Amino acid sequence: MKHAMIFVNLPVADLAASRAFFEALGYTFDERFSDENAVGLILGDTQVAMLLRRDFYQTFVPDKQVADARSASEVLVCLSAESRDEVDALADGAVAAGASAGRTEDHGFMYGRSFDDLDGHTWEIMWMDPAAV
């Protein structure tokens, strides 16, 4: 089975602050999927992270508690980068925009860094040497 697109839904406390954070990192948004409740963060041609106001997110899971990503982890979003320099630029930019720095892994053929965004969601940026794959 193949899927045409993926939408990762993440609850956020302050939609405007989250949008500004990701704009500071150079990301853009799909306004077709954006309104007062959500913004569609474009991660790639067919990948979108839906940043949803916490109360709006709750409507999709009415019988469950919405996790606070600052104290519990439910998802780790890993994105590929084209180079080690791109990994560093994005991770450094995220910290400069208010993120908390996470871990760094350097295995030579694979290099990655992570950060927690304004709501505590963990993002990992990873580069792998194509010759090693």
Image (cartoon, rainbow, N blue to C red):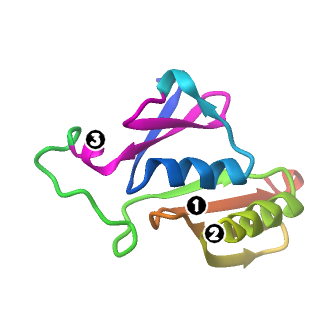
Give the residue type that dot 2 points to.
Ser
Image height of 37 relative to 109, above or below: above
Residue, x 82% and y 62% (percent of image)? 89
- For residue 15, the mark is none
Return the residue nearer the eye: 12 or 122: 12
Magenta-colored stretch includes residue 46: yes
Real-space Cα separation, disc 2 to disc 1, in angstroms: 5 Å
| Above/below status of 3 relative to 53 | above
Q: Dot 2: what SS?
A: strand
Mark 3 or mark 1, which has the lower sequence index?
A: 3
Q: Which residue is mark 2?
A: 114
Q: Quick one: label 1, few (<14), some, or many (20+) residues within 10 Å? A: many
The residue located at (28%, 41%) in the rendering is 56
Q: Could you say where residue 121 lies in the image, as x and y percent from the top left?
A: 47, 62
The amino acid type, in three-letter code, at marker 3 is Phe
Distance (Cα) linking label 3 and label 1: 22 Å
- As drawn, the label of residue 56 is 3
Instruction: Please indicate whether residue 3 sits to the left or right of residue 78 in the image.
Output: left
Does the residue at mark 3 contact the one at mark 1 (Cβ under 8 Å)?
no
Question: Which residue is labeled 1 in the image?
Answer: 123
Q: 56 or 84: nearer the eye?
A: 56
Q: Earlier in the sequence, mark 3 or mark 2?
A: 3
